[in-house]
Amino acid sequence: MGRRRKTNKHLPQRVYHRGKSYYFVDHSGQWINIGHSVAEMYRSYASILEERPIVTMENLFDRYMAEVAPMKAERTQRDNAYEVKFLRVALNQMIPSEFRPKHGYAYYHERRKRSLTRANAEMALLSHVFTKAIEWGVVDKNPCREIRKERPKPRRRYVTEDEYQAAYRVMPEMAQCAMDLAVLTGLRPADVLRLERSNLVDDGIQIDTRKTGKSLLIEWSTELRRVVKRALQQKPQVRQSIICNKQGKPYTVDGFSSNWYRAIRKAIGNPENPLTEPFQFRDLRAKSASDDTVEAASQRLGHTDPGLTDRVYRRKPTRAKPLR
């Protein structure tokens, strides 16, 4: 076995990050450029990955990220690439067949000290890695299935109308359109930001949601038509994206979020505004659900179970009448 890495511990064997590119170093010492992004790197790595037995968890992570991760949605690929960094640091040198639930619990309890959400996500990824390991004949069972995880509490931030208007006033016009679209449609941020002219049909806005793949048709209303028209009137007008940056290209979720937080800070710093604490762009999906009936909100959010809408997305206090 070669020497343990001192840097780039989150990357596959023989892969290094230099400058803006990832490189695979073959047995002759030649550095081969295999892409600029993490997703591109793993696709290229899969094509040159030599068939070899999976001896350590490092080998198992390598194969999973090369063969399984590229088949997932782009956002999930990025999440998995981030999550596997921490798994690699702790577990790379372990032998898969020797992994026991106690090792999983030790990892989980340590990671949840930093973030319960991140710990759950990393354990979910590790469990799927072992599921694929069963398929590949590496192990006979998935030890992660015996690990009980704590369910994080749903986010409870509700954006009042006054807070919405306070944030709205400091946003650029394109971001205002994005806010209106998020509330009117109840779509997730990633789906709002990737809407295109091709999604506009006679009956409304039709989209296959990225997270679930479910097809939704948000019917036209006078207000929804007005918002879409306003967004398309923003420069540059020759473009496909409904919400775009100054170059006419769609925002990434991270790029939009950066602009969002800069603007939100302006609202909080203004004593004339009622906004005293920030809220996230994704909280507008919950506002869309909270400001309507649970039945209508559940349909708009694409939920088959209204209980999920009520439990996670409806955040207004429950009204009750006093005893008479």
Image: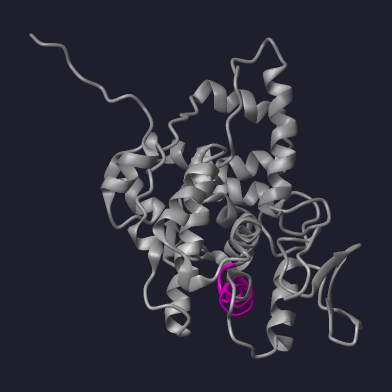
Q: Residue at x 72, y 17 (%)?
A: 269
In the image, residue 320 above or below residue 90: above
Q: Could you tell me residue 30's position as x and y percent?
A: 92, 83
Residue 187 seen: no
Q: Main secondary structure of the magenta part?
A: helix
Q: Is residue 283 magenta?
A: no
Quadrant hosting residue 84: bottom right
Q: Residue at x 58, y 74 (%)?
A: 60
Image quarter where the N terminus lies is bottom right
Quadrant hosting residue 264: top right
Which residues make up the magenta segment?
60-73
Q: Could you tell me residue 243's position as x and y percent?
A: 68, 52
Q: Residue at x 68, y 60 (%)?
A: 241
Quadrant hosting residue 267: top right
Q: Residue furthest bottom?
A: 51
Q: How many marks?
A: 0
